[in-house]
Amino acid sequence: MLIGEKQRFSLFTPLTRAVALAAPVLVAQLVLSQLNAPLSGIAGVQAQEQQKEERETRKTPALRNKVYEKLAEAQAAAEEKDLAGAAKILDEMIAGRRDNELNSYELANVYNLYAFIHYSNEDYPRALQAYENVISQPDIPLAMEINTRYTVAQLYFVQEKWRQGVDALLAWFDMTTTPNAAAYVLLAQGYYQMQDFDNALKNIEIAIADYDTKGRIPKEQWYNLARFLYTEKNNTPAAVGVLENLIMYYPKKQYWVQLSFMYSEQNEETRQLGAMETAYVQNMLNKDGEYRNMASLFLNAEVPYKGALVMQRGFEEEIVEDNSRNWEMLAGSLRQAQEVEAAIPAMERAAEKSDNGDLYARLGSIYLDAEQNAKAIEAITKGLERGGVKRADQARLVLGMANFNQKNYRAAREAFQAAGRDERSEKYARQWIKYMDSEIKREQELQKDS
């Protein structure tokens, strides 16, 4: 059961936290990965008697031989997968006993073996009840109670009873003298599911620190829970630190992409680019948006040629989509890199796939830069006829320049005059008309002298 995540946006490509910041592992999966089959019958007795009871000494009733033999018989049946036969033996032990015939320790072992049977049948509620019956017996070995309380907490989590699971686990913490990192992780997951993020973070930090101090590598899912919680608390530096550890120990594409995103949150553009480029050069990027984001980062860093190479590779490998927006980005990158001739076919593709005339107007501007004036006139005229040109005044200035270069002075004048009707281009249009008039006059005087 995942907690809903708020939507966030990067500088270039929209990224939700579901993508940029993956949610922690499901508690049930974590519990099932930790939960061993319950100690059953005599094996449970022997293992528990080997543990030291350091904080308290209990006088435990003896396990009598005739009870031991019945438990051994039930356990043998269980180990042979005859769970029904094992349960029948235990039922007879419970149903046929007279008052006080089974002492508390013997009853605890009967219920412990019941728990194993129910657990094996994936009947977690009945397994849980059997464990509760174990705990309720007086004078059982302390080690047996401690082990059982931990398993009770695990089974509550498997059933998504978070509050009961946390309470059971806290009771276990009160009794044990040697809690391990996995127990702190389990408690952190319980608090996380209850949306008590402060306590969740405190406990996952303890687990990670425990492994760090022992020279062990914390588990990937532990880091992910910590990262998520740091992000929820808007502690970006701590979240970045966790991601850097994830990349060190569990190098995956998602962590490089997420780290790049987090660097952008800190306005560290150079590191943002470096993290994304590392993923790119390792061939980890394989989505249209990722390639667009990579190219955008290069453009933002004023390295347009690299941005163009990214888009070209994306088209060649059919990763980026064959649409107007992507061809426009390629053309823009090439133009900024002063690769005007190469930019023309890309902008032609972009204009052909566009629904309006704006890209044709921009194509005309590239044609002008390449001194292809006739094509510039044709493209801009087509764009203006289509409509949707964002800066029609600028398009008409370019149209006037192309006509002027072709010595189409009347058409040039009309284009400049039309551009001058927009106050944003009025000054430039007037300057161009003045310059054109001087050129016309100069040409006329040259003709007279000849």
Image (cartoon, rainbow, N blue to C red):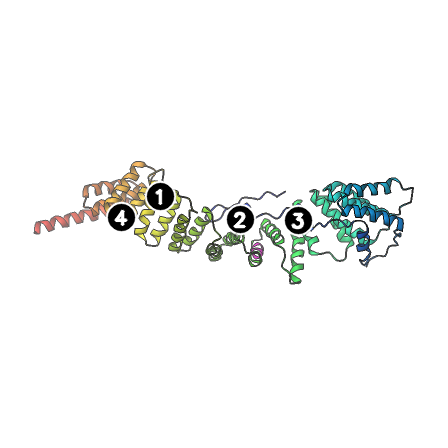
Q: CA distance from mark 3 to mark 1?
A: 50 Å
Callout 1 touching callout 2 (CB < 8 Å): no
Disc 4 versus disc 3: nearer the observer: 3
Q: Position of residue 427 (x, y in %)?
A: 27, 46
Q: CA distance from mark 4 to mark 3?
A: 63 Å
Q: CA distance from mark 1 to mark 4?
A: 17 Å
Identify which amino acid the numbered label 3 is placed on.
Leu
Tag 2 residue: 20
- Residue shown at 34%/47% (left/top)? 346
Say which quarter of the image contains residue 2.
top right
Left or right? Give the position of 160 relative to 444: right
The answer to which of marks 1 and 2 sits earlier in the sequence is 2
Q: CA distance from mark 1 to mark 2?
A: 30 Å
Tag 4 residue: 368
Tag 1 residue: 350
**What residue span does the magenta drawing correspond to?**
238-243
Left or right? Give the position of 338 relative to 261: left
Q: CA distance from mark 2 to mark 4?
A: 42 Å
Identify which amino acid the numbered label 2 is placed on.
Ala
Seen from this angle, which residue lies furthest top? 386
- Placement of 260 over or under 399, stated as above or below: below
The answer to which of marks 2 and 3 sits earlier in the sequence is 2
Q: Give the tally of numbered discs.
A: 4
Q: CA distance from mark 2 to mark 3?
A: 22 Å
| 10 Å crowding of disc 3: few (<14), some (14-19), many (20+) | some
The answer to which of marks 2 and 4 sits earlier in the sequence is 2
Disc 1 versus disc 4: nearer the observer: 1
Q: Position of residue 438 (x, y in %)?
A: 17, 49
